[in-house]
Amino acid sequence: MSGTSLDGIDGVLSSSNKTLHAAFIAFPDALRAELLALQSPSENEIHREALAANQLTTLYAACVQQLLKDAGISADQVSAIGAHGQTIRHRPELGYTRQIINPALLAEVTDIDVISDFRHRDIAAGGQGAPLVPAFHQSVFGSATQTRVVANIGGISNISILRPDGQVTGYDTGPGNLLMDGWIHAQRGQQYDDSGQWAASGLVLPDLLVELMSEPYLALPAPKSTGRDLFNTAWLTQHLQHFGSAAPADVQATLTAFTARTLANAIQRDAPGAEAVYVCGGGAMNTYLMRLLQEKLACPVSDTGVLGVSPQHVEALAFAWLAERFCERLPGNLQSVTGARGPRLLGALYPA
């Protein structure tokens, strides 16, 4: 899995929803810059997208080889690779989403069946194509006795509301790390705010927070999903135009508070009886963000590690699960989450 944070590839070798081994491969700076550029219209982008997809696929293959080496197993012992690819556009309201990868090349290089293109079938059925992780969250983190919320904080944040009766709802709540990452990179040349230390050194700007919270997407009813098509540098620049004298650390603090506020508001509105919130994704490593989220919620906030799954492995494990569902010819989406007309088999097979 490589997500909207654009930091790199998380891979897991799994069996029965358990992580056996995990690997991470960081994106080279040039590839990261190209993937970011492809989020917006640009010159010769079809050609550049194809080249980026091939380079990305080579890194996916390296991640697979690392997992096989660490586990001491051969390719023929693996049923399939679930390869999501890198989202560069997500426009379900226009009937499409775009994840770049070359799954045929991945199958050729690894000699393992590849399952890819998980989102298009849900969109074809009238759904948002995202988020797809709530079904997996229910299978691994659901409880028969309490309402739980799983908050995935990657580049974008999404929540899965898991109720004891088995009912599941969820949607993208808004930005996760992407605005914070983009700001600290622009101001300090760092890829991310380690533990939220820079944000914690600043002050939240109430007027700026109100300005950010005015984004219409936040008030839309579910099902809904979003991405860098909306929340990007241009969006932030527009909202910062009246705050030119703000200290950069204060802006970082406010962006962190914005992510915490949008998540907390969504949980309070749609899961008021939640008895626990479990966070996964890179945001779980942001100590300051986790503290802000806990301050806004009455129930305990922790990461998914307390349930036996590292917060860094959850999303990759989810796409391994989706690949397994495809192999078993079982649906992978939830109508209650994406708004699709019904359950659908997600993915496309590229045989070894």
Image (cartoon, rainbow, N blue to C red):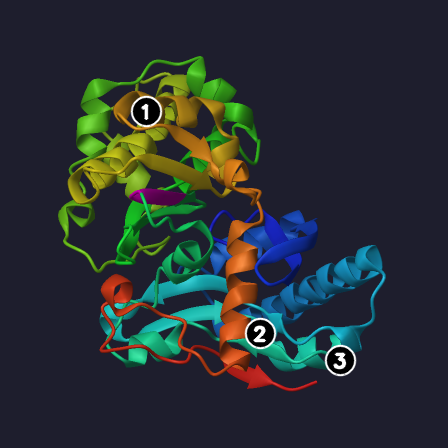
Q: Which mark is residue 254?
A: 1
Q: Amino acid at mark 3?
A: Asp
| Whole-percent x, y for residue 247 in the image | 37, 16
Tell me where residue 59 sits by quadrant: bottom right
Label drawn at residue 295: none
Quarter of the view holding residue 31: bottom right
**How many marks do you count on the picture?**
3
Q: Residue furthest front?
A: 145
- Which sits in the foreground, 154 or 6? 154
Pointers 1 and 3 in contact (CB under 8 A)?
A: no
Q: Mark 2 falls on what kind of element?
A: helix
Q: As shown in the figure, which amino acid type bears the numbered disc 1?
A: Thr
Dot 2 and dot 3 residues touching (CB under 8 Å): no
- x, y percent for residue 268: 20, 36
| Range drawn in magenta | 146-151
Residue 85 can be seen, yes or no: no
Q: Is residue 150 magenta?
A: yes
Quarter of the image that includes the C terminus: bottom right
Q: Which residue is mark 2?
A: 50
240 relative position to 300: left or right: left
Q: Residue at x 37, y 79 (%)?
A: 121
Disc sitting over residue 111 in the figure:
3
Residue 5 part of the magenta segment: no
Quarter of image, res 332: bottom left
Tell me which label, 1 or 2, sits earlier in the chain: 2
Q: Nearer the viewer, residue 212 or 350?
A: 350
